[in-house]
Image (cartoon, rainbow, N blue to C red):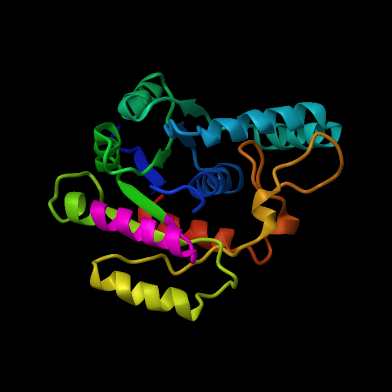
Amino acid sequence: MSDTIYVAFATQKGGAGKSTLTALVASYLRYVEGVEVAVIDCDNTQHSMNVYREHDLLVTNENPRLKRIMHKFYLTHKIKPYQILMTSPGDAVKVAEDFVKAGNNPKVVFFDITGTINNRDIVSLIAKMHYIFVPITTETGEMASSISFANNVYNRMITTGQSSIREMRLVWNKVNSRDKPRLCEIIDNYMEKLGLSSLDTVLVRSSKFEKDGMETGNGAIFRSTMLPPDKRLMKGSNLEELVKEIRSIIQV
């Protein structure tokens, strides 16, 4: 397991976009850049990654156009969809280890985690991650929750050395411009005093992140667990830049 990197997008409050980020980054790495990945869906409150996969299977089976696109993509690239394994936080690492022991060789295993610090299994799981990315938005409640969660992880796990965490960064999501606005810079300065830092790249607020296909029609897909994002929707999204920055941190 020493070569497999554990990465989590985690927050303790819904709405910041951890599951969407997990799907976007995992799919971009696998389907655009060819990196072997797997996803452990261990958010017992909603299992969003499993919901995404079930939706993707439905629309690609029912929409002839998407079925043709998927068939051509997998035939051309000779790959299969990455695995999404649904389990509980307490069993998540064992599920990942068993997956590798079964002959699979993911470079990165993404964990979709709900980030409550009051649950022993979740705390133990977070401590076993190598890298944690905490989505943060400019909405006051979500912002405060993300900072609180990251501050807890930093003080209770990273500074004490009682974890496997090599680095943690916050990720500005649902921002109204491609560059960091003044508010984000002010909050970054505040977080720096807490020992926290955010990625340089921000993800913009855009309806394209919700485009996951329909059972009929010719609509483009951006968020999918089975296909790369449509190139027509990539412009202005900052997804390519985000993945590049994340790769530079996790070294894959």
Give residue 172's position: percent from left, percent from top: 47, 63
For the point 35% across and 37% down, which residue is it?
4
Give residue 180's position: percent from left, percent from top: 50, 75
Q: Which of 129 and 14 is in front in this view?
A: 14
Q: In this view, does 89 lie above or below 227?
A: above
Inspect this view and state whether residue 97 appears.
no
Q: In this view, does 188 lie to the left or right of 151?
A: right
Q: In this view, does 190 lie above or below 1?
A: below
Magenta-colored span: 135-153
Q: Nearer the viewer, residue 5 or 49?
A: 49
Q: In this view, does 199 lie above or below 181?
A: above
Give residue 227's quadrant in the image. Answer: top right
Q: Nearer the viewer, residue 16 or 55?
A: 16
- Magenta: main secondary structure equals helix
For the point 60% across and 43% down, which residue is it?
31
Q: Is residue 124 left or right of residue 173?
A: left
Number of numbered discs present? 0
For the point 77% across and 48% down, which residue is it?
220
Q: In this view, does 122 lie above or below 250?
A: above
For the point 64% across and 41% down, which residue is it?
224
